[in-house]
Image (tube, rainbow, N blue to C red):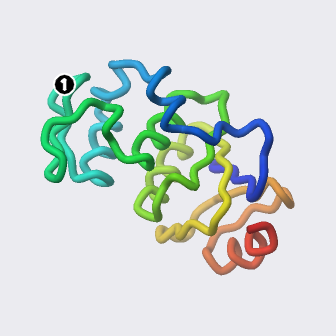
Amino acid sequence: MLNIFYGDMKEAVYNTAAYFKYDYEDNWITDPFVKKMIKDVDQSIVLDSGVIDSPVLGKIPPTGLSGGVKTLILVKFEKNKIFNASTCGDNCAKWLLKIAETEDRTINLRHLMKFEVEPFDIRILNTNEIVHTMEELVSIAGEFV
């Protein structure tokens, strides 16, 4: 299940770009699930662990990926960390849910992310309530952002 804490969270990693730069592993980039995320969110193709073909930027290293994709990769592989997912756009929402389908994940948000795939199961940690629609999510999370 995806767990979300809205607002300030002292244990969350806020600078996901710096964390990614120094902590990502090459095999993360070539993971089939990650390749699909990169293709969907950044419209880029992983050529190998160190080179991604971006239609906008050309050949880039993994550190050149968007902040959203880098955060998604961290959420997938750094299971015991909590990341600020406000670096993610709404196009990352479905991937957060997919990552959390098989294992619980916790993220921190400072904005209302739009989860278009309904119904979903999201626990809002601020109130410990589980919501299944955007209407339910907004009515609770709106109090905290």
Q: In the drawing, does residue 122 fall left or right of residue 63?
A: right
Figure check: 118 above or below 37: below
Q: Nearer the viewer, residue 86 or 40?
A: 86
Rate crowding at label 1 as few (under 14), some (14 to 19) or many (20 or more) other CA atoms within 10 Å: some
Residue, x 51% and y 50% (percent of image)? 96
Secondary element at image label 1: strand
Q: Nearer the viewer, residue 91 or 132?
A: 91
Q: Position of residue 103 (x, y in %)?
A: 59, 37
Q: In the drawing, does residue 58 fall left or right of residue 8?
A: left
Figure check: 42 above or below 131: above
Residue, x 69% and y 76% (percent of image)? 138
Q: In the drawing, does residue 59 fall left or right of residue 7?
A: left
Residue, x 19% and y 28% (percent of image)? 51
Query: Which quadrant of the rendered structure holds the C terminus?
Result: bottom right
Q: How many marks?
A: 1
Q: In the drawing, does residue 40 fall left or right of residue 9?
A: left
Which quadrant holds residue 82?
A: top right
Q: Which residue is mark 1?
A: 48
Q: Position of residue 88 (x, y in %)?
A: 49, 54
Q: Nearer the viewer, residue 143 or 139?
A: 143
Q: Nearer the viewer, residue 70 or 60?
A: 60
Residue, x 48% and y 37% (percent of image)? 17
Figure check: 26 above or below 65: above
Q: Amino acid at mark 1?
A: Asp
Q: Position of residue 130 (x, y in %)?
A: 75, 61
Q: Position of residue 14 (x, y in %)?
A: 63, 42
